[in-house]
Amino acid sequence: MTVGRAGSKVARRSVDPITSRPTLVTSAAQAVRESIYDGRLGPGERLVEADLAQQLGISRAPLREALHQLGKEGLVVTVPRHSKRVQDVDSTSVDEVYSLRKILEAYAVERVIAMAGKDGVNQLRQVLAEMRQAAAAGNRELTARLDVAFHSKLYDLAQHSLLERAWYENIAGKLQIVFNATRHADLALKEPVQKHELIVRAIASRNVERAQDLVARHIDDAWRRAQSTLKGRAEPSSALGLRQVAQSSRRVTP
């Protein structure tokens, strides 16, 4: 159900009100980002500035800047007549996200092994421990969020600003949207944990070839699972259909 405009009853809250203000733009961007990440704003959903500004408790000007920022992150796209929507998910976008990941992550792993040292490995193990805990609790959404966080940590540890920028601006957010759209894939939660454990072991042993091979296989498996899930349901052509894929999720913070 669509959120009502200003002055009407709000039937469904897409974003939470801003209660702290580092800056209005930063706070608004974070609020909308979280709502996209947790699926309350689903793939392809139209972003109505008046509605979002009302829910956030801010004017439309900082919200507009926030949406522009999220556009740079690949989370929001502008469609004809300047309407904005959450990034859509289809077979082509999945291909693009995972094929680019496969290229960039091989290099990221090589740099992590060369530069990160024991402290970097320990940081990866910390994210892995959180992922293991989420999986043991049966929290599929949080496990997916921590999956993205693990790979974000790889790029952080690679100490390569352009590589890190490529990840955050072109892959990380879109990958989370893909996870949201395919969250009902039949996958035992222990499987991604086990795959990441193998990757960490290879990095800790400084085995570049082994680590790169494990990462490549992990990405290929994720790509096949995402494509299979998309094909297993009728790919909707409208934003309404796409909203129904993610609408039942709840807010989770990793």
Image (cartoon, rainbow, N blue to C red):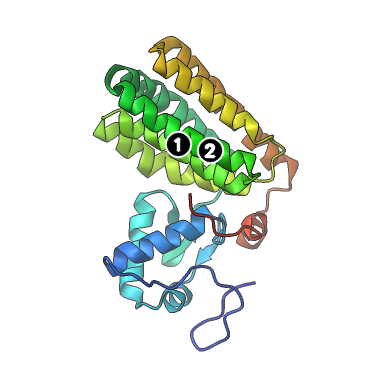
Question: Residue 172: x, y in percent?
Answer: 43, 42
- Whether residue 106 sits left or right of residue 163 in the image: it is right
Quick one: SS at disc 2? helix
Q: CA distance from mark 1 to mark 2?
A: 6 Å
> On residue 32, which mark appears?
none
- Whether residue 236 sits left or right of residue 204 in the image: it is right
Question: Residue 26: x, y in percent?
Answer: 31, 62
Residue 141 vertical position relative to residue 30 in the rendered view, above or below: above
Any part of residue 92 in sight: no
Any part of residue 107 in sight: yes
| Residue under pointer 1 | 127
Question: Residue 91's quadrant in the figure?
Answer: top right
Quick one: SS at disc 1? helix
Residue 214 vertical position relative to residue 57 in the rendered view, above or below: above
Residue at 30% across, 24% down: 116
> On residue 131, which mark appears?
2
Q: Quadrant of the N terminus?
A: bottom right
Given residues 210 and 104, the one toward you in this image is 210
Q: Which amino acid type is shown beneath numbered disc 2?
A: Met
- Whether residue 11 sits left or right of residue 37 in the image: it is right
Residue at 49% across, 68% down: 15
Q: Residues within 10 Å of mark 1 (few under 14, many from 20)?
A: some
Residue 32 vertical position relative to residue 218 in the rendered view, above or below: below
Question: Residue 247's quadrant in the figure?
Answer: bottom right
Q: Which amino acid type is shown beneath numbered disc 1?
A: Val
Question: Residue 113: x, y in percent?
Answer: 34, 18
Given residues 129 and 28, the one toward you in this image is 129
Q: Residues within 10 Å of mark 2 (few under 14, many from 20)?
A: many
Contact (CB < 8 A) between labels 1 and 2?
A: yes
